[in-house]
Amino acid sequence: MTGAAPVPRSMVIDHIGTLVSNAPELGTGELGELPGAALVVEDGRVAWAGPRERAPGADTRVDAGGRCVIPGFVDSHSHIVFAGDRSREFASRMSGQPYEAGGIRATVAATRAATDGALLDTATRLLREARAQGTTTLEIKSGYGLSVRDEERCLRVAGRLSEEVTFLGGHLVPPEYAADPDGYVELVTGPMLRACAPHARWVDVFCERGAFGEEASRRILTAGQRHGLRARVHGNQLGEGPGVRLAVELGAASVDHCSYLGPDDIDALAQSARGGAGPATVATLLPGVDFCTRQRYPDARALLDAGATVALASDCNPGSCYSSSMAFCVALAVRELGMTPEEALWAATAGGARALRRDDVGHLGVGARADLTLLDAPNPLYLAYRPGVPQVAAVYKDGDLVS
Ligand code: NIG
Ligand code: FE
């Protein structure tokens, strides 16, 4: 083959019952909803969207059959690189045992003992599972290795599957450092970070009682930032604590969990969304975790009413929530967190994109990646209206049919 430029492939998705674009200029409301729509994809990007009678021609045509089209879910929080099984821990929680961060250690032991191939197989299966349910962007964290070698190999596995890779050496102090937690922070901020930073885009820390306190969390996050990583935080999952305020102080893209917030935490998040020093620190809510650990749900209504930017994510992991379903998160957010169906869908798509500081995903405005899902439903209310029912008919990523 000689050097002819590739011919742009174009495709029109026609006969869309309702298009949810998250691009207000294309339709009504924040979701930019448009009934009777078509959308043209060229070279993996949205080239045109609007009323179907005005759609330009394209090389190929897909008939959406009156189905609803939504942006692919942007799941900004997962831990899918792991080995082992914690189903019994889940069962004992359901009969009254509290969730404790310590369960993470069981997964660490199994992950350290697993081959790279086994870790990749599990993570690949979970990525496919998420994709089949409409997720087109999935952030993946390390955090079950907790040694230089094991964190690095978990990140290499994650990097095979996603560009949104997060270094979470600061997940928990591993047993061999139980008597010397400061020594572990030294390891994380020194040799581990040097080995891991080239394989990650983000640095995260579990800032919680039983994991890392405020000072250790600050050290880990700022060391990561000095290595060119951007910060995100696990905070306020099991009780009120410094996580949210630290995330805002350091300009983190997101603080995740937020189940226990005081008025100052809500103010800090709202203030950051009103345009503090930079883009908002997003409050990423993980209602699947609160469901699976019988914890308190976050007060999304208070956050939204104060003006904070809210995202929803799965937190898919073997301990606190072994679900990759963003539709389940949407249903929980509407039933339990006080969000409207529209707010929940926005949070699971555009909100996730904000939490990853991405403007090319989470919406279907012109120029966005053609990451989208056809729902077997006439409108997006059905996501929350029919909980637990598979409604995903097809998933496109960069314009290619992937599920
Ligand atoms: O986000 N909170 C900390 N880490 C995970 C849980 C990990 C586990 O229990 O294995 C979470 O919920
Ligand atoms: Fe998590």
Image: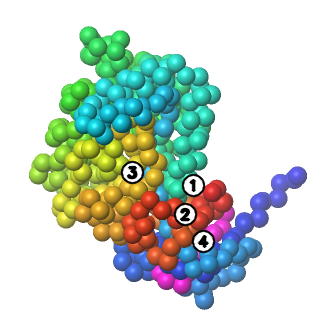
Label 4 vs label 1: CA separation? 25 Å
Discs 4/1, front: 1
- The label shown at residue 132 is 1
| Residue shown at 58% from the left, 41% from the top | 125
Whether the residues at callouts 1 and 2 have beta carbons within 8 Å, the answer is yes
Please tell me which residue lies in front, 247 or 297: 297
Badge 2 marks a residue whose secondary structure is strand
Residue 275 appears in the figure: no
User: Residue at label 2?
Assistant: 392
Label 3 vs label 4: CA separation? 28 Å
**Mark positioned earlier in the residue sequence (3 or 1):** 1
- The label shown at residue 109 is none
User: Residue at label 3?
Assistant: 313
**Mark positioned earlier in the residue sequence (4 or 1):** 4
Spot the residue most to the front: 95
| Residue shown at 54% from the left, 25% from the top | 153
The quarter of the image holding the C terminus is: bottom right
Discs 2/3, front: 2
Magenta span includes 368: no
Label 4 vs label 2: CA separation? 23 Å
Question: Does 367 sit left or right of 358 as displayed?
Answer: right
Discs 4/2, front: 2
Vertically, is 124 above or below 11?
Answer: above
Badge 1 marks a residue whose secondary structure is helix
Whether the residues at callouts 4 and 1 have beta carbons within 8 Å, the answer is no
Please tell me which residue lies in front, 113 or 183: 113
User: Residue at label 4?
Assistant: 47
Magenta span includes 45: yes
**Mark positioned earlier in the residue sequence (4 or 2):** 4
**Mark positioned earlier in the residue sequence (3 or 4):** 4
Label 3 vs label 1: CA separation? 16 Å
